[in-house]
Amino acid sequence: MKQKLRIGIVGGTGYTGVELLRLLSQHPDAELVAITSRKETGMAVSDMFPSLRGRVALKFIDPEKAGLAQCDVVFFATPNAVAMTQAQALVDAGVRVIDLSADFRLQDIAEWETWYKTTHAAPKLVAEAVYGLPEVNRERIRSARIVANPGCYPTAVQLGLLPLVEAGVVDLDHLIADAKSGVSGAGRKAEVNILFSEASDNFAAYGVAGHRHWPEIRQGLARAAGKEVGLVFIPHLTPMIRGIHATLYARVSKEDDFQKLFEDRYRDEPFVDVMPPGSQPDTRSVRAANLCRVAVHRPRQHGGGSDTLVILSVIDNLVKGAAGQAIQNMNIMFGLPETTGLMQVPVVP
Amino acid sequence: MKQKLRIGIVGGTGYTGVELLRLLSQHPDAELVAITSRKETGMAVSDMFPSLRGRVALKFIDPEKAGLAQCDVVFFATPNAVAMTQAQALVDAGVRVIDLSADFRLQDIAEWETWYKTTHAAPKLVAEAVYGLPEVNRERIRSARIVANPGCYPTAVQLGLLPLVEAGVVDLDHLIADAKSGVSGAGRKAEVNILFSEASDNFAAYGVAGHRHWPEIRQGLARAAGKEVGLVFIPHLTPMIRGIHATLYARVSKEDDFQKLFEDRYRDEPFVDVMPPGSQPDTRSVRAANLCRVAVHRPRQHGGGSDTLVILSVIDNLVKGAAGQAIQNMNIMFGLPETTGLMQVPVVP
Amino acid sequence: MKQKLRIGIVGGTGYTGVELLRLLSQHPDAELVAITSRKETGMAVSDMFPSLRGRVALKFIDPEKAGLAQCDVVFFATPNAVAMTQAQALVDAGVRVIDLSADFRLQDIAEWETWYKTTHAAPKLVAEAVYGLPEVNRERIRSARIVANPGCYPTAVQLGLLPLVEAGVVDLDHLIADAKSGVSGAGRKAEVNILFSEASDNFAAYGVAGHRHWPEIRQGLARAAGKEVGLVFIPHLTPMIRGIHATLYARVSKEDDFQKLFEDRYRDEPFVDVMPPGSQPDTRSVRAANLCRVAVHRPRQHGGGSDTLVILSVIDNLVKGAAGQAIQNMNIMFGLPETTGLMQVPVVP
Amino acid sequence: MKQKLRIGIVGGTGYTGVELLRLLSQHPDAELVAITSRKETGMAVSDMFPSLRGRVALKFIDPEKAGLAQCDVVFFATPNAVAMTQAQALVDAGVRVIDLSADFRLQDIAEWETWYKTTHAAPKLVAEAVYGLPEVNRERIRSARIVANPGCYPTAVQLGLLPLVEAGVVDLDHLIADAKSGVSGAGRKAEVNILFSEASDNFAAYGVAGHRHWPEIRQGLARAAGKEVGLVFIPHLTPMIRGIHATLYARVSKEDDFQKLFEDRYRDEPFVDVMPPGSQPDTRSVRAANLCRVAVHRPRQHGGGSDTLVILSVIDNLVKGAAGQAIQNMNIMFGLPETTGLMQVPVVP
C-alpha cells in the first residue's frame, strides 16, 4: 500500500488553515500529523471548528513539540513574517515547505521589506523559493524545496492577464485590475472594519494608495513580459464570504483572436476554465472549488469599435487563491496526479 | 399658509415608487393625492408596504380615475415605454412631469429605439425634456415642463467624471467606468437571477456586451466635452440592497490640481460631497440619503509615477440615483429650497 | 468491475435538482443517464449551472424521450403533484423511485388533499411508499419500491424531537418547533418575496396559520408516540442561502438523562451528531454536508429550575433536508455503504 | 425662540452612539454640545463616521473636559459598568441622565452583580432610576432624574407579552421567548464571532444557558404580573444588521379576545403598532424607525384547536431597542411632544 504523505500545518486557526484542513482531510494520499498553534495548544481542532467533528481528530500543538521535522511537507498558514523565521530549519531537515503567507513571494528583498515593513529573515531562501503558480511554474515546482504560494488577488489577476502579456498583444504600461474580494480574504482577525455590521450591505474600495499584492502581480507579469509593466490595481471589499472577481482592462496593441489565445494557453490546465464567448462568470460558479474561470470580452467603447479588452476572472480566494492551490502544489511536488483531492464540484446555490 | 404641492405618482409598486412614498410622505410641502396601479387597484398602499402604515393613507387607484390632470406634478415610476404614452396629455393639461424611467433620457430617438427595442411614442416631447441632473442643468430644470430623471449608474458615473471632462484634462477616448450596484437597482421584478439564493454571497459582471445606461452616460459626457467620448462601461451586481460604487479610470492629458478641480466644481452643490484626499467612501455612507460622495486618487502604476486618475463615486441608487434626485428636481421646478425634505442623515450601520 | 447505478432525474432545474447533480456527479457508484425538463429541453445542464461545467455532460431532455424506464432509480425533483402522475409507471417497470416532492409523504390522502389543494392521483402508491427518514425507517427503505423523501423542516424537527417522543418523557400535547430556514428552502422560483432586495437584511415568520410541513411532522411524531401529538410549528425566513435551525421546546413529563438519551438513540447513525452538553451548533457547521447536529439544553426558567427542554437541531436544507438524504436512501436501497458519496466536509467559512 | 436642549453623549463610538448622533442631529430641539471618547479624543466624529459629514461638527473630547455638567441631559452609550461610576455626579449637578447601558436596569443589586460580574458602584442611584419603557412608566419618566433605557430584547419581548401578563390571561410559569437579533445588537467590538465571514450565511442560538436580558425581562413581567414569572428565553444571531424578531409563546389560561386586548392596550401609543389579524411583520418594516409592530396569532396545535398564543414582535434594535427609545424618554422628560424627531419612515427596501 502506498505510504500517505505526512503533513504538518503551522498556524491553523485562520481561514486558510481551516480550508487546508477541509481539503486535506478529504485527500486520499494525505495524513495530517500535526497542526500547531501557540495560543490554542491543547484545544481540539474540532472544538474550534465544529464543522470538522469526526473528520479531524488532532489537537493544536505547540510548534516546539509538533515534530514537524518528521513530516514530508509542512504548510505555513501563518501571518506574514513567521514562515521566514522557521522555514530554513525545516528545509534543512529535508521537509518540503509550502508557505501560504507572503514571506517568499517577492524576489526583490528591498521591495518586500518596504511593503511588509520588517527586515526579511531569510533572503537566501527567498532566492531559492519557487513561486507556486502551477500554470506558470509547474516544472520548477516539481523539484522545489520551498514554494511561495501566490496571493489570492495575484492568482486571479495573473491568470486573467498572462495570455495577453505572454503574447505581447496589449499595452503593458496601462494595465488596470479592478478587483473585488469577499471578506474572508481579510482573514479571521478581530478587526472592526470586517465586522458583519460594517461589511454587510456595503461596498468600498480599499488600499487604493497601495496594496501588497500590487508588487506581487507586477513581478509575475514582468517575468512573463520580460520587462516592467504598468498596472493600476484597485481592490474592493464586497459583502460575500468567499470569492474574487477581477475585472481586467488592457488596451490592444496587436490584433489577434483573443478568445483562441486564452483557449490555447489554458487547454491543458485542469483548474483554469476559459468560458465561451459572451460569458460572465459569477464567483459562486467556483465556490469551494479549486478553479479559475476566465472570460474574454471586447465591449463597445465609441459608437463603433473598441481597442480595449475586458477580461473577467473569478476564483474562490480560499481555494484556488490559497489552500487549494497549495495542495495543487503539493500534488505536483510529490508526483501525485495534480487533481488528487481537488475535484470538489462548486457549491451552488 | 403655503399651499402644498399636489402630487401624483404613476406606478408606485416598484422600489423607486416606494422610495418616492417614503421621501414624499416626510416632505413638508408635498401632498400625495394619487398613486396609480392598474394591477393593484383598490389595495391600500400600506398593505403592500407595511413600512408605510400610518404614514400613507392612499389606496392604489386606476390611472383613469386618478385625476392626475389636477396635480401640480406627476412622477412616473413606471417600467420603460409607459411614460412616453401618457406624459403629453399631462403636460398639455399644465401638469409638470418628472419621469424616473428612461423614456425621455436620450435625445437621439434612433439610439433610444435601438436600446429600448420599441418605437418611441413621443419624440417631440423628448426634444423638450430636460435631463434632470441638477449639477448640470439646474437652470433649465427650473422652468422645465418635463424632466427626464437620470439613471442610477449615469448619476454616479457622470458626477465622478464631469469635472475632468469639462476641464478637458483627460483622454476622452478611453474612459473606463467599472460600476457595482446593489440588487435593488434591478427593480422589484420576479426574476430568477435576482433571487436571494442567486444573488447573495455572489458577484458577477453583467451587460458587458452593452447596457442601456452606456449611451446615456456617453450623451452626458459628450455634452460636457463638446464632442463624442469613448467609454468602456462594465456594471456588476453586488450582494447588497442599496448603493452604487463607480470606480472610474481616466488617463491624464493635461496636468492640474485634480482634488481642487473637484472641490471647485462642486463647492456649491448641496448633494455632492468631495471627500478629502485619500478617502475611500463606502456605499453605506450615503445609504438612504440624497448624496453623492466622490474621492480623487492617482495611485501608483509603474514603480514610479502614474498617468491614470481613479475616481471613486458612491450614491444610493434609490435616492440620488432615483427618487431623491426626482424630488430634488421637483424642489427646483417649484422654487422650493433645493434641500427641502432631502436632508435625511445616512443610515449607518 | 462493479456496474454503476443508472440514474434518472425528473425536473432538474430547481435547487434540489442542482444539488442532486452536485452530489451524484461525485458519487463513485452513480451514473447520470438522463435529466428531464420540458421547458429547457436541449439546453446543456452546464449552461444553466456553470458550476457543473466539465462535470455533468448531459442536456435536459424531454421526459418522453428520457428512457427513464431503463434506469435503476429515478429521482423526482419536481414541484408537488407531478411525481404522483408518473411514479406508478416507473415502479411497474421495475424502476425504484425516490420522490423529493411531497406527493407520497402523507399517508392520510384526505389530509394531503387539504394541504396540497388537489386530488391525489396515486393513493395506492402512497400506501406502499416508505417515508425516507433512515433514522426511523432504514429497514423498510432497503426494500422499498418508492421512497417519499422527507421535507426539510420535518427532517430537522423530527430528528430533534424523536428521542424524546419515543421515550415518552415529554408532554406530547404541547410541543413547539420554532424553525428558521435559509431562502433556498423556498425554491428557485421567480417570486417577489424571495428576491434579494426583499429577503436580505430582513427576518419574518411566515405560514403561521398553517404550513404544509406541519401535518408531515405530526404524522412522524405520532407514529413514534403511538398517538396524536400537539405541535405549534412556526417557520421563519432568515437571510442566508442554506440551512435550517430548529429550536424545539418540550415540557418534561418524566425525568431522565436527556443528553444520554440522545447519544444512545443516535450512537450508530452516521449522519446525526449529538453535540456535547452546552453546544450551540450553527448552521454553517453542516453547510453543504449530509449532517444533522443536535444539542440538548435545559435552560433556567424561574429563578431556580426548569421543566422545559430546548433542543437545537441544524441541517443543510438542500442536503440532509433534501438531495443528500435522497442519496442516503438510494445507498440503502441498493445495498451500498450508507455513507457512499456523502462524506463531504462542511464548507466553513 | 425656544432654547434647545443642551446634550452630551458619553461614549459615542459604538452603534448606539452613532445612532444617537443620527437621530439627535435631526431633532429640532436638540443641540449636541459634547461627545466624549477617551480613546479617540481630538478625532472629528465625521472622520470616524463619514455618514455624519456636514451634519455633526463635533470632535470626540476627553470626558474631563467635556463640560457635561453644563448639559441639560447626558446620554451614556458606554459599555456596562461605566455609567454607574459617573452618573451620580451629573445627577447631583442637576443634569438629567439617560443610560443606554445595563447599569441601572435591574433593581435587585445582587442579581445585577451576578449577571454583570462586578460590584455595583451606585446602588442608591439604582433605587432612584426609572426603567425607561414609556409604554409602562411614562409618568415616572417625566420627572426622573435618571432613566435606565431598556435592552433591545427586553423591549421587544415585554411589548409583546405585557398585554397578556397584565390581563392575567396566560400561564405565567411557562412563557417562551424565541428571539432573533441582527448582528449590530452585539455592538461595534472587534470580536471574531461577529465578523462578516463568521456571521454571514449562518444562524445559531447563543446564550442558551443564560443571557443578561433574561433577568431584565423577568423583572418587567413580574412587575406587571405582581408575582414572579417563568420564562425560557433563547436568543439567536441572524445574518442581518438591524432588527429583532421575537416569537413569543404563551399558554392561554383564560379565554379573551386577544386581538382586541392588544389593540386596547396600545391604542394611544405612538410607537407600538398592533397589526391586523393574520399579519406577519418583518423586521425591515421598522428598519431605522422608532417602532414596535406586534401581531397576535393562535395557530393550530392539534388537529383541532389550540391553547397556545403566538405573538410576533419586531423592532429595530438600535432605534426602539436603544437610541430611539432613549430620545423618546428625553422628549417625555423635557415635556416635548413624545414623537419629536422620531417620525422617520422605515427604510424599505
Image (cartoon, coloured by chain):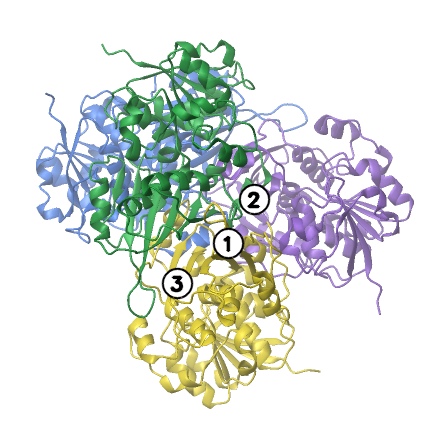
Chain colours: A green, B yellow, C blue, D purple
**Three-letter code for the amino acid on which mark 1 is drawn:** Ser
Q: Using a 10 Å C-alpha cutoff, classify the residue at mark 1 as few (fewer than 14 neighbours), some (14 to 19) or many (20 or more).
A: some
Q: Using a 10 Å C-alpha cutoff, classify the residue at mark 3 as few (fewer than 14 neighbours), some (14 to 19) or many (20 or more).
A: many
Split into 4 quadrants, where in the image is the N terminus of chain D? bottom right
Q: From what the image shows, is residue B207 above or below residue D93? A: below
**Three-letter code for the amino acid on which mark 3 is drawn:** His
Residue that carries the numbered disc 1 in the rendered image: D279
> Any mark on residue A197, and which?
2
Query: Which residue shows up at 73% across the image and 50% down it?
Result: D326
Same-chain check, marks 1 and 3: no
Give SS at disc 2.
Answer: helix
Q: Using a 10 Å C-alpha cutoff, classify the residue at mark 2 as few (fewer than 14 neighbours), some (14 to 19) or many (20 or more).
A: many
**Residue D253, x across and y down, in percent:** 60, 39
Residue reaching furthest to the front: A227
Q: Can residue C106 be seen in this view?
A: yes
Residue that carries the numbered disc 3 in the rendered image: B174
Q: From what the image shows, is residue B25 above or below residue B176? A: below
